Image (tube, coloured by chain):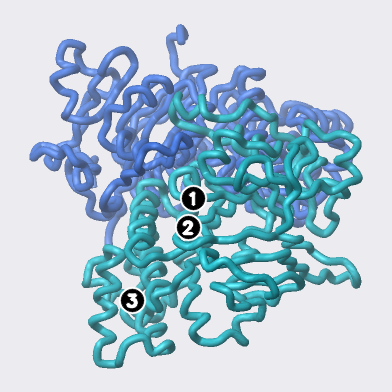
Chain colours: A blue, B cyan
Amino acid sequence: MNQTKPLLDIRDLYINYKVYGGYSYVINGLSLQVWPGEKISLVGESGCGKTTTVKSILRVLPEQAVIPGGRIIFDGAEVLKLKNKALNAMRSRKLSMIFQDPTASLNPVFTVGRQIRDTIKYSGIVDRHDKKAIQELAIKALKDCSMPDPERILENYPFQLSGGMRQRVCIAMALATASKLMIADEPTTNLDVTIQDQVLKLIRELADEKKMSLILITHSMGVAREMADRVCIMYAGNIVETAETESIFENPLHPYTQGLLNSIPKLTGDKVMAGIPGRLPSYTSPPPGCRFAGRCPHAMERCSKAFPPYYRVGGQHQVACYLYEQEAAGQGPAEPETKKEGRAND
Amino acid sequence: MTEAVDKQDVLVVKNLKKYFPTREKGRFVKAIDDVSFKIRQNEVVGLVGESGSGKSTTAYCVMGMHPITGGALSFEGRDISMPAQQRSMDLKREIQIVFQDPGTSLNPQRSIGEILRMPLAVHNIVPRSQRNTRIRELLDSVGLPQDCFFKSPRALGGGEKQLVAIARALTTNPQLMVLDEPTSALDVSIQAKIIGTLMELRKQFNMSYLFITHDMSLMRNISDRIAIMYLGRIMEMAPTADFFLKPQHPYTKMLLSSIPVVLKEEAKVKPEKVPSQGEIPSPVNVPSGCRFHTRCPFAFDRCLTEEPPMAQVFPDHIAACHLCPGQPVQP
């Protein structure tokens, strides 16, 4: 990427949830950059904070969430400081999101057409009284998503469509208005593998065609490998490793990434799945150091004391693990994720 | 059963049919439409397919949870075509099931000890005085810590809950275990442990598994034979290595080539890309002829009118497709 400025720049973000008797420290100093036109994938297991991270970009976190520290800069604007009007403008024209469950994200009592038209109407890209133009855009949006017979589908209610079709409608709705960044939160988890193939192909083609950036959240390493230019592995509220797709699959560095890859059953069938012992640490009283230390086969004493900094190992491969301190010594600390302590202000 | 039954076969499913009535008279949801297969002693048979293909219904029919519409089921030579209520206690003991979602298949108001004691008491497996010892042995054999005994299912993680469900199925020393997507609700790092435990238990207790899943990569690693279902029918069935290296049916090829993989070596063993198109039709209006023709890129005239018979392509490898020449087989 030769652009000088990232489209999305998350710096040192902390997110806590208020829970009974204290806080749940979920996102722990996360930094992430997405460049224009880049497709990245956030990979992690359930409960690692993938969805919380992207919800903070749209500022649709639930009420009990507190953001004690960090900055989110999207397209030059400080997202966390935006006033309502500017925030709505950003949501309607620059950012779009596709959720995991298309059944839950469509309103069952309105037709698909009404919902797509509303999205277009309030985005302000056309005059909101120009019904004809709005209808045309809605039809075009469905056509872009290779839906057969868009006029008829606009008259359908969500229950009349199959799961794959509903997800296409959600994608159409997300892309009906011009957008710079598309966030797809496990868009194919509920779909069968053949339908997943179709939907992923669609998302990839649309992102390329419209030169959008893409953040794809998934728990499947296989999906990430097919879709992304760059993969970020998340564990317990932090990105532990980030690298170009090829590099991360050929040469996984972080013990968690290695464990994850070893756990996946392979089509070649000649490797035994290893798994990772133990489970996620408690978010209400997280360990002060590396949150993976309790399950890590290479854990050292210092791992449980402070969160390791990001070490740059060859090119764009960054990993937050003390094991690579020696290897990265010659290359200087990675930018901009330089300072890392345990948790922010309580 | 008229013919002599091979002692090797634990479960024989013959021309199984299960139709559910719809509101409209005379129309049925054909969940299972003529399925035949066998599970041999000590074998893991994988049943794969998309949602709506009838995998789980097959499992429930084997368990007797649904009365069957047609065909026959037999277990070690004994007829088990009747629903569970009419089966004898020892039949129920021999066949056990593990469900997909451990969160809803364990009673949240009972402790793990109580959950495991129930089948021991109902089937009177061990005398009352030894039940607690037996429960502790069971916890041990699935690798759960002893302090689970007094815990409630709520206090356990998803993987541990599934281990409890497995321990519960083990209480009666079954011959055949039906596993209905036991790991699809779990993360991969947890899945590996559950699968490892299941495979070890099978060796230890000489069980056979009917393993239902939609994860083909998982099947590659654990099953001996695989059957692929589509709209209530088996499209292809083969020994695992054959199934992945020499897939015959276009549907199998489409599924296999759609799997996202993580290694270059894996990408090499995938069959040539068969583009995925269309969606699974409604089982109420099953397409005429070959039921896959609406999505098949190779479909021709004959496929639209004539249902392909099951044919043997290689030894022990059967497929139902006009394009796969072979000896027609009688189920």
Structural distance between the alpha carbons of marks 1 and 2? 6 Å
Towards the viewer: B302 or B12: B12
Discs 1/3, front: 1
Residue B243: x, y in percent?
A: 57, 40
Query: In the figure, residue B2 lies in which quadrant?
Result: bottom right
Label 3: chain letter? B
How packed mark 3 is, by other alpha carbons closer than 10 Å (few <14, some 14-19, many 20 or more), is many
Residue to which mark 1 is pinned: B224
Marks 1 & 2 on one chain: yes
Mark sitting on residue B112: 3
Residue contact between numbered discs 1 and 3, judged by CB atoms under 8 Å: no
Towards the viewer: A216 or B134: B134
What secondary structure is marked by label 3? helix
Structural distance between the alpha carbons of marks 2 and 3? 30 Å
Structural distance between the alpha carbons of marks 1 and 3? 33 Å
Residue contact between numbered discs 1 and 2, judged by CB atoms under 8 Å: yes
Is residue B8 positioned above or below B67 on the image? above
Horizontal relation, residue B220 to residue A326: left or right: right
What secondary structure is marked by label 2? loop
Mark toward the start of the polypeptide (1 vs 2): 2
Residue A73: x, y in percent?
A: 43, 26
The amino acid beneath tag 2 is Glu
Label 1: chain letter? B
